[in-house]
Image: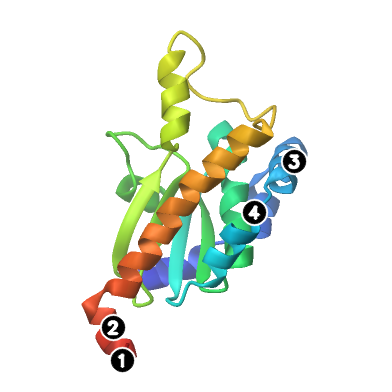
Amino acid sequence: MDFAAKLRDGLSYTEFLEAHATPEQKRRWTAVFDAVKLTDAQRALLGSFTRDMPVFCLAGAWCGDCVNQCPIFARFAEAAPRISLKFYDRDAHPDLALLLRMCGGARVPMLLFLSEDFQEVGRFGDRTLSQYRKLASGLMGAACPSGLVAPESSTLATITAEWLEQFERAQWVLRTSSRLRGVHGD
């Protein structure tokens, strides 16, 4: 896939919601966005990123997991000028959905981390470890959150910290890459 060309097809957080969300879905996403609070340490970490990092987020405005996690990514992008976060609707971008399948299925949200020259750095989704632990402990219940209710603040803080580790990991891959260190002379 030509990731540079695909970046041009991506939408900002606001554009994505305007294009794909119903008013009720926008309300849900906004409630989580408003609830996401980055700590000073998290803001400092994100602000310290030195490599440009395009990030593709494959999502669905209808998806409860996306409601509860994508606003976190938007907060990260606000705090890190080096992150170029673009959103793609899973159904409108079947080529990206096919590329980012997990366990043989089209899952969302899925993140694709890229280098400044559009080399793949990593991919991660659709839930964090704490969410999978919670899901596994209650397998008799629903398999997918509805997004009707925002996560509790402690749960949201845990999910935020776990996602931040993935963004940090990608940044460290970029920062320690001998190829990119050669390009940047550092």
- Residue 151 spot, x, y in % from top left: 64, 31
Residue pictured at 51% horizontal, 24% vertical: 144
Amino acid carrying label 1: it is: Gly
Relative to 85, is 110 above or below?
A: above
Query: Mark 4 belongs to which amino acid?
Result: Leu
Q: Is residue 183 left or right of residue 150?
A: left
The foreground one among 95 and 166 is 166
User: Tell me, what colour scheme is on the image?
Assistant: rainbow
- Residue lying farthest left? 178
| Image spot of residue 173 (x, y percent) | 31, 66
Instruction: Name the residue tied to disc 4.
Output: 38
| Element type at mark 1 | loop
Q: Give the distance between the C-alpha atoms of the residues marked 2 and 4, in whole angstroms.
A: 29 Å
In the rendered view, tell whether residue 79 sits above or below residue 146.
Answer: below
Closest to the camera, between mark 3 and mark 4, is 4
- Using the image, tell me which numbered label, if any, was put on residue 126: none
* Residue sticking out furthest to the top: 140
Compare marks 1 and 3 and give the one earlier in the sequence. 3
For the residue marked with disc 3, what is the amino acid?
A: Ala
SS state under label 3: helix
Residue wearing tag 2: 181
Distance in Å between CA atoms under marks 3 and 4: 15 Å
Looking at numbered disc 2 in the image, what kind of residue is underneath it? Arg
- Image coordinates of residue 159 in percent, x first then y, are 53, 40
- Look at the image and tell me in which quarter the C terminus lies: bottom left
Say whether residue 22 is left or right of residue 51.
right
Q: Which residue is mark 1?
A: 185
Q: CA distance from mark 1 to mark 2?
A: 6 Å
Give the class, few, some or many, for how many residues have Cα within 10 Å of label 2's Cα (few <14, many ≥20): few
